[in-house]
Image: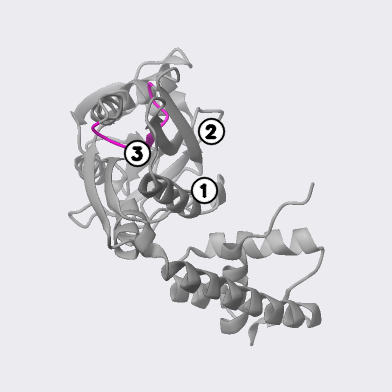
Amino acid sequence: MLNRISLRQIEYFVATAESGSIIIASERIHVSSPSISAAIAHIESELQVQLFIRQHAKGLILTNVGEHLMKECQEILARAGNLYALAANYSGSIRGPLKLGCFSAFAPMLYAEIIHGFAHLYKSVQLDVCEGDQEVLLSGLLRNVLDVVLTYDLNIDHDLIHFEPLASLPPYALFSKEHPLAEASAVTMEELAEHPMVLLDMPYSSDYFISLFKQKKLSPNVVKTSKSSEVIRAMVANNIGYSILNVRPKINYSLDGKQLVRVRISGEQRPMQIGLATAKNAVLNTVAQAFISRCRAFISDQYISGMDAPHFYDPHIRVKDS
C-alpha cells in the first residue's frame, strides 16, 4: 500500500523549492529543518524521483522533474486554499460551547495554533479551557464537566474513556550544560540512577518516570520535586540535578535564561502518547468534532504544534540550541 503525501509535506517542498534552502524555508514557515528534510525525503521515496541537486555555491537546485512537480504542487496548494476559503463561508454553522481540557505541561506549546487558532477560526464558539494534571482532567471528563481533553495516555480507564493517540513522545534526559553527562550522545538508565534527579511530581506522570527505572530494577536518586515543568527545567538548568521529560519545547533554555541539553536515553522505553480523551457516554456535538479534527491536523509523529516533533529527533545527536 502506498503511503500518502500530505498537504503539509507538499507545503514544505514548495517552500524549499522557492527559497532554494532548507534553512531559509524553515525560517519562513516556522518549521524545523529536520521536519522539512524528512518531508522532502518522503516525497522522493514515494514518487521514486530526486527533487534537488545540492550545489555549494547555489544551494539546492531543482532537478527537471523537481521543476515540474513544484508547479503541480503549487497548484495543489492553491486549490486546497480555495477549499478552506469555501469552508470559511460556512464556519458560522460551528457555534456553541466547548469545554476543553489540556494537560498543563504542554498547554503553552499547543495553545497558539490549536486552541487560539480554533477560537479565532470559529468566532461563534464559546471556548472554556481548563488546564490541569491528569487527575483533574480525567475527573472532569467523567463528571461531564469537560467535553474533550488533550492529554497523555496515563491511567486511562478504557471502559469509561475513549483515548485517540495522535503522537508518541519518547522520554529523554534533560541536563544543564555543565552536567557531566551533557556531552554524551546517549545515556543509560543505569548511568542516570547514579546522579541526583529532580522529578516532575504530577499525578500518574511521576509514576511513569519512576517506572522507567523500576523496569531495570533501579531506583532514581530523587533530590527535588515540583509539580511545574518550568520549575523542573529551572532546577535542571541550575545543575541541581537532571530530569526525565517527554515534551520537547522548541527552545532549550529555562526561564532564567540558562541553557539546557536534551540527551537520548538508550534502550527501549515506553513513550507517552499525546492524544484526545472523551467520555464514552458523551455525545460529541459539532463543535467538539471540529476541535478534534483540528487536533488531528496539528498533532502527529511528523509534526506537533509548538514542539520539536519526536519522529525526526535524531537518536544519535545531542540537542542543543546554537
In this view, 228 is above or below 162:
below
Classify residue 14 as left or right of residue 233. Answer: right
Along the line of sight, the residue nearer the viewer: 54 or 103: 103
The disc at residue 266 is: 2
Residue extent of the magenta highlight: 145-155
Residue under circle 1? 300
Which residue sits at x=25%, y=29%?
Answer: 140
Cα–Cα gap, marks 2 and 1: 23 Å
Q: Which x, y percent locates residue 136?
A: 23, 28
Classify residue 73 as left or right of residue 225. Answer: right
Callout 3 secondary element: strand
In this view, 26 is above or below 259:
below
Classify residue 74 as left or right of residue 163. Answer: right
Cα–Cα gap, marks 2 and 3: 34 Å
The disc at residue 319 is: none
Q: Earlier in the sequence, mark 2 or mark 1?
A: 2
Q: Which x, y percent locates residue 9?
A: 60, 64
Q: Which x, y percent locates residue 102?
A: 29, 41
Q: Earlier in the sequence, mark 2 or mark 3?
A: 3
29 inside magenta stretch = no
